[in-house]
Amino acid sequence: MLNPLSSDLISLQEEVRQAFGWSLEADDASANAMSIHFQGAAPYNQRSWSTTSRDEALSNLEGAICSAKRLIAVGAGSDSIQVSEYPEALFIAADGAVGAIDDLSRVLCVVSDGDGSEHLEKAAKFGTHVVLHAHGDNTNIWKELVARWCLFEQPPPLTLTHQSDKYYQGMYNPGGFTDGDRALCFIQAAGRSLHDIECLGFRTDYVGPWSGTTNPERKKQKLVWMEESMRRLGVEHQLIR
């Protein structure tokens, strides 16, 4: 399973909470609710969402991440991507940025807190693995999503994440703050070095076209923290500023 989170990345999550005036209690409440909702042999009447099945799906995903000859992380500032122009590449998308990719069969997973709108929905319906994140102000969002996704003919494999230093059954904290830098943290936690991956669309000069509905000024403030997270990960050179 995912490698332990570094103390530097744990401290960043607390720094972000303090900077925006958010509470750890709210993050914990969302994570606890998600953990409870996914307990049992068939959460939402889906055996593929049981803890055992999610562990198997995560193990398969980690294997694919580590064995990919070419791995590309896609952020919200990406241009449209024709996968034929990226031979042998597999992709990990940050939330709505999955909409930039023209062939979902080449997408290993989408890392999302649930605001990727129709792009996330399309990927989930396709059966793309979703690394679904719980934080303080998205509880209703993730509840609505999984209530819909469980009705799909092929519900997406799920990995559940949170942003607390506490333990929650069946969940992980890979690190990171925005969907973009959390995707990079997830790749590293899966055992793949970030020094041999590529990043497309990670930028701080403007809010990317694949971002969900958001407050533009607040989003720009969040991108400052994405940059700091990438600096701590050692991949700030992949940013477009």
Image: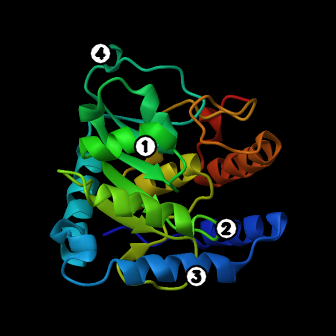
Callout 1, which amino acid? Answer: Leu
Which one is nearer the viewer's eye here, 168 or 146? 146
Is disc 4 in contact with disc 1, using a CB cutoff of under 8 Å?
Answer: no
Callout 3, which amino acid? Answer: Ala
In 3D space, how far apart are the residues under numbered discs 2 and 1 (Cα atoms)? 24 Å
Query: For this view, does 40 lie left or right of residue 192?
Result: left
Callout 4, which amino acid? Answer: Ser
Disc nearest the viewer among 3 and 2 = 3
**Badge 4 local density, few (<14 within 10 Å), some, or many (20+)?**
few
Q: Quadrant of the C terminus?
A: top right
Disc nearest the viewer among 4 and 1 = 1
The mark nearer the N terminus, 3 or 4, is: 3
The mark nearer the N terminus, 2 or 1, is: 2
In 3D space, how far apart are the residues under numbered discs 3 and 4 (Cα atoms)? 43 Å
Q: Position of residue 222 (x, y in %)?
A: 73, 50
The mark nearer the N terminus, 3 or 2, is: 2
Q: Quadrant of the N terminus?
A: bottom left
Tell me what residue is drawn at x 60 percent, y 48 percent. 234
Q: Which residue is mark 3?
A: 29
Q: Position of residue 50 (x, y in %)?
A: 22, 75
Mark number, residue 75:
none
**Badge 3 local density, few (<14 within 10 Å), some, or many (20+)?**
some
Q: Which residue is mark 1?
A: 120
Q: Which residue is mark 4?
A: 84
Q: Is residue 89 above or below residue 197?
A: above
Callout 2, which amino acid? Answer: Gln
Q: Which residue is mark 2?
A: 13
